[in-house]
């Protein structure tokens, strides 16, 4: 079903704002998405009507707050088709989720010579935590190469899985290239050797429907702020067999059963990993974002964004001296590009003056930039609220870049 | 003039596309790299300094029009200056690109004042000052690459 795009655009208050005195053309949703009024309202309502600490009090207000918080957990469970609500852990974001697994699985159990497999297109948040684990344990980081199109080299991947591999940690969709990795095959190959797989779902969660049971991934991690929810909240999904075996991550309130100075016993899943007062308003806002996405339908969102991606890709191809970086067959609606003779930063500044917000730089993927021998790219990324007319404004603004910097 | 017109003056575009003194120098005695991790700008400065006088500066590297133009114009402006004079010029330059000052920078800094439009773009200040920070460190005979982060 096509999206009711006018209604959607009316739902997002910030789209009425200006950027540099022009109507805002927001093409940076891979960085963070804008928020529908219902999400803003849900956090507002939480603070105006329900605020109390969760899991800690007998009065009814706190019961309501706890219910809202736990309802959001059920919504997440349903959204990603997890088996059990205790497999849903609220964290700060993707970064913290990956660090949690790095700490509790990597640091706690990896031995010298063990291998951790990542890819050349990872975000820094799926590189650095593993480098720290390697320093602490003597494990070794192995990197699966990618092709010039920006696709994972699956032959290399298969050959790199071996008896020493303890974990495959892979980006589901690339923030810098848009590539959607063949995660079904990645997981099957790893599981054939009993190797668990972590998926960094930061860039896939808002763009396609996710079924962690069908995928059979062992960990799936994402951020609320990239799926129309508030900042400061993320989700770690982990199969309970793994989470049960994990040592605690942070110690404190709420993550315990019983504390004495001699011995402390830890709370059951998922609370064991939610030490201290959580971002309750953020979690409630995330719940509202899930309602919003469910109302529109992930299939419909996927079709809308894919149509936009194809339209934009065709338009980009006609721009003189422009080269798209990342031409994988399966992509989310992300287009990275460079223009001959003009640095991405200058392009960013000119687009800004036209009201167009894009990201320029290395996109927290410096090894990937190195792979393409580029210091930086310009990245336009689309969300469910973007329209073809905005692509047209972007293309017209690129002509302005040529006016300033000359033709190739 | 619009902010953009002020930022991308013809002189900047010209220096950005055709940077002057853009080569390795074998006889330089202060050589240092500078990075701007956020943007990926990187350059190497080759400074020939004798008895506290800058005899020449060349550079190599890649970056946006602002960082290339700033480096290129710096190599021209500081050639023949004493180290103390260069530091004084940097101070003024820094003030020009970061502060809302009503000094007559055209009179004080000549051609370099073409970069004054940067003040309106806080995100671009690092681009404009990368080569200058690198120069100051090179003159102090630092061997640690400069990073603007
Ligand atoms: C693929 C990917 N992984 C991880 C992250 C980190 O997410 P966060 O900053 O929300 O922790 C991002 C966001 O920039 C991302 O795009």
Image (cartoon, rainbow, N blue to C red):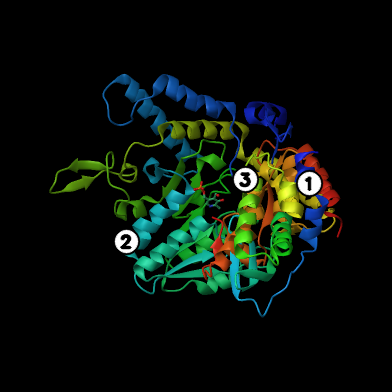
User: Residue drawn at (77%, 66%), measured in percent from left and top?
Assistant: B20
Residue at 44 percent across and 24 percent down: it is A46
User: Looking at the image, is A45 positioned above or below residue A172?
Assistant: above
- Residue at disc 1, secondary structure: helix
Work out whether residue B11 or residue A335 is closer to the camera in this orientation and state it: B11
Q: Which of the chains bears the disc numbered 1?
A: A
Q: Quadrant of the C terminus of chain B?
A: bottom right
Dot 3: chain letter: B
* Residue B40 visible in the picture: no
Task: Tell me which label, 2 or 1, sits earlier in the chain.
Answer: 2
Disc 3 and disc 2 in contact, CB within 8 angstroms: no
Where residue A274 appears, as percent x and y from the top left, is 34, 42
Question: What residue did someone put label 1 on?
Answer: A311
Q: Residue furthest left?
A: A262
Dot 2 and dot 1 within a common chain: yes
- Which corner quadrant of the image does residue B122 belong to? top right
Q: Is residue B5 above or below residue A134?
A: above
Host chain of mark 2: A
Q: Nearer the viewer, mark 3 or mark 2?
A: 3
Residue B22 horizontal side relative to residue A154, left or right:
right
Inter-mark Cα distance, 2 to 1? 48 Å
Residue B98 marker: 3
Question: Within 8 Å of ligand 1, the CB of disc 2?
Answer: no
Residue at the disc numbered 2: A108
Specify the quadrant that holds the N terminus of chain B: top right
Give the residue at x 58% y 62%: B136
Answer yes or no: disc 3 within 8 Å of ligand 1: no
């Amino acid at each position: 079903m096509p999206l009711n795009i006018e209604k959607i655009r009316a739902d997002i208050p910030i789209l009425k704002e200006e950027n540099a005195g022009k109507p805002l053309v927001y093409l940076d949703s891979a960085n963070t998405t804008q928020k529908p009024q219902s999400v803003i309202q849900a956090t507002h309502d939480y603070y105006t009507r329900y605020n109390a600490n969760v899991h800690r009090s007998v009065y009814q207000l706190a019961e309501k707050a706890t219910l809202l918080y736990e309802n959001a957990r059920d919504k997440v469970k349903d959204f990603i088709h997890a088996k059990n609500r205790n497999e849903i852990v609220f964290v700060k974001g993707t970064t913290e989720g990956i660090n949690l697994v790095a700490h509790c699985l990597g640091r706690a159990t990896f031995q010298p010579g063990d291998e951790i497999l990542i890819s050349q297109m990872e975000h820094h948040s799926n590189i650095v935590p593993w480098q720290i684990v390697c320093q602490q344990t003597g494990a070794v980081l192995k990197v699966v190469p990618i092709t010039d199109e920006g696709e994972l080299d699956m032959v290399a991947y298969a050959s790199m899985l071996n008896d020493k591999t303890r974990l495959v940690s892979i980006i589901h969709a690339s923030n810098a290239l848009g590539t959607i990795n063949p995660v079904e095959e990645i997981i099957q190959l790893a599981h054939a050797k009993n190797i668990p797989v972590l998926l960094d779902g930061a860039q896939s969660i808002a763009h396609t429907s996710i079924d962690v049971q069908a995928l059979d991934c062992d960990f799936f991690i994402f951020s609320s702020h990239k799926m129309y929810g508030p900042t400061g909240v993320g989700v770690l999904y982990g199969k309970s067999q793994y989470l049960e075996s994990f040592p605690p991550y942070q110690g404190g309130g709420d993550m315990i059963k019983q504390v004495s100075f001699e011995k402390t016993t830890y709370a059951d899943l998922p609370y064991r990993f939610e030490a201290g007062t959580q971002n309750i308003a953020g979690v409630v806002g995330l719940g509202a974002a899930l309602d919003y996405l469910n109302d529109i339908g992930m299939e419909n969102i996927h079709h809308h964004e894919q149509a936009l991606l194809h339209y934009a890709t065709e338009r980009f191809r006609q721009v003189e001296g422009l080269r798209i970086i990342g031409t994988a067959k399966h992509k989310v609606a992300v287009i990275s590009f460079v223009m001959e003779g003009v640095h991405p930063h200058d392009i960013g500044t000119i687009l800004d003056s036209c009201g167009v917000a894009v990201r320029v730089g290395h996109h927290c993927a410096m090894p990937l930039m190195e792979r393409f021998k580029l210091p930086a790219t310009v990245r336009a990324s689309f969300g469910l609220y973007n329209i073809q007319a905005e692509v047209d404004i972007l293309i017209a603004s690129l002509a302005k870049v040529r006016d300033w910097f000359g033709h190739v | 003039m619009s902010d953009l017109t002020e930022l991308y003056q013809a002189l900047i575009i010209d220096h950005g596309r055709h940077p002057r003194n853009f080569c390795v120098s074998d006889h330089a005695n202060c050589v240092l790299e500078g990075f701007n991790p956020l943007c990926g700008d990187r350059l190497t400065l080759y400074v020939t300094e004798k008895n506290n006088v800058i005899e020449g500066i060349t550079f190599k590297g890649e970056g946006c029009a602002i960082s290339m133009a700033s480096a290129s114009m710096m190599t021209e402006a500081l050639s023949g200056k004493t180290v103390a004079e260069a530091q004084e010029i940097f101070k003024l330059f820094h003030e020009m690109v970061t502060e809302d000052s009503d000094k007559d920078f055209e009179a004080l800094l000549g051609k370099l004042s073409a970069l004054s439009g940067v003040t309106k773009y806080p995100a671009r200040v690092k681009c404009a000052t990368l080569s200058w920070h690198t120069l100051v460190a090179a003159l102090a005979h630092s061997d640690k690459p400069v990073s603007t982060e």
